[in-house]
Amino acid sequence: METSKIIRNALKIAFPLVLGGLILWWMYRDFDWQGLWAALEGGMDWTWMWLSMPFGVLAQMLRALRWRQSLEPLGERPRLSSCMHAVFLSYASSLVVPRVGEVLRCGVLKRYDGTAFTKALGTVVTERMVDSLVMLLLSALTVLMQVKVFAVFFRETGVSFGTLAGRFSAAGYWVTAACLLVLLAFLWFMARRLEWFSHTRGLLRNVADGILSLRGIRHMPLYVAYSLGIWVAYFLHFYLTFYSFSYTSGLGVMSALIAFVVGSFAVLVPTPNGAGPWHFAVKTVLVLYGVGEPDGVMFVLIVHTLQTLLIILLGLYAAVALAFTRRKSPPEVRLGAA
């Protein structure tokens, strides 16, 4: 029994890595690596790349602020620094095991601030629901805003949907189908895992309290502002990188928004930071907007790699900061929750 559990856990870690690795190998099997070094050394505008990075940090900071606010109605008042370090560490840890960070950050608050683990986990579930709603609204708005643009484009160029579909190779269709199947399998697995909560009534009640914590938030406009601000920051973190490359700098904000929305859905496929599915999805959008495939492949490789390095650096900072963080004693926690 113990051996089978070890094998299952090993597969949970290995499968996302293998899936992402296979997609990346397929995309970059004929890649011009010398061209990459040339782009990094002088073929791109680093100013815009550096300007995009603070927005990646801002998005995680706003997430920490929103999380702390959603914990207050439950009588939990962790330190803001602990929330931020927990969020930083959660993103970095998810690069190794996808989705593990959502549980890890609840454990960090439990360890350093005495926050009830199950209540924190419930608020994380609420976060995911709110983020999903924002993404759906953003996606619908983007499609509606682009309908006329697409209609003019198709009418004036004579491009049909069949022509666009023809730009996909057979392998591209297989990669898309594989990503969708993996996403469905992941959702099924998470649904099965939720059955575990039914074993303990108290645990289930705490999780439910966390999910319903929105009812007690005192400053709902601020919560909404945090929620919108997170995604605005994420978008600017992505969009400003367009100006780092000559072949994307003239595409415009709407094309970037389309690529951002498609990429955001692609990262739902459980690979480290969406590696593989994100590359394929964003590259495909860029190609449909007229960017050459070699340039599109170069863009997604550089942007994703640098943004992933930022996540790693924030995670390392959080790990060091937590090592020097004083844990709250139980009496202090109770006082803070009063």
Image: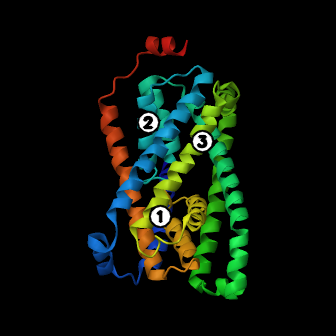
Above or below: residue 165 compared with residue 85: below
Residue drawn at (40%, 19%), measured in percent from left and top?
328
What's the distance in space between the residues labelled 1 and 2, CA to CA? 24 Å
Mark 3 vs 1: CB contact within 8 A: no
For disc 2, the marked residue is 84
Q: Position of residue 250 (x, y in %)?
A: 49, 72
**Disc 1 or 2, which lies upstream in sequence?**
2
Which of the 4 image quarters holds residue 51? bottom left
**Disc 2 or 3, which lies upstream in sequence?**
2
Mark 1 surroundings: few (<14), some (14-19) or many (≥20) residues within 10 A = many
Residue drawn at (44%, 36%), measured in percent from left and top?
84
Left or right, 315 with respect to 228, comes to: left
Q: Which mark is residue 275?
A: 1
| Mark 2 element type | helix
| Mark 1 element type | loop
Amino acid type, residue under disc 1 in the picture: Ala
Left or right, 282 with respect to 184, comes to: left
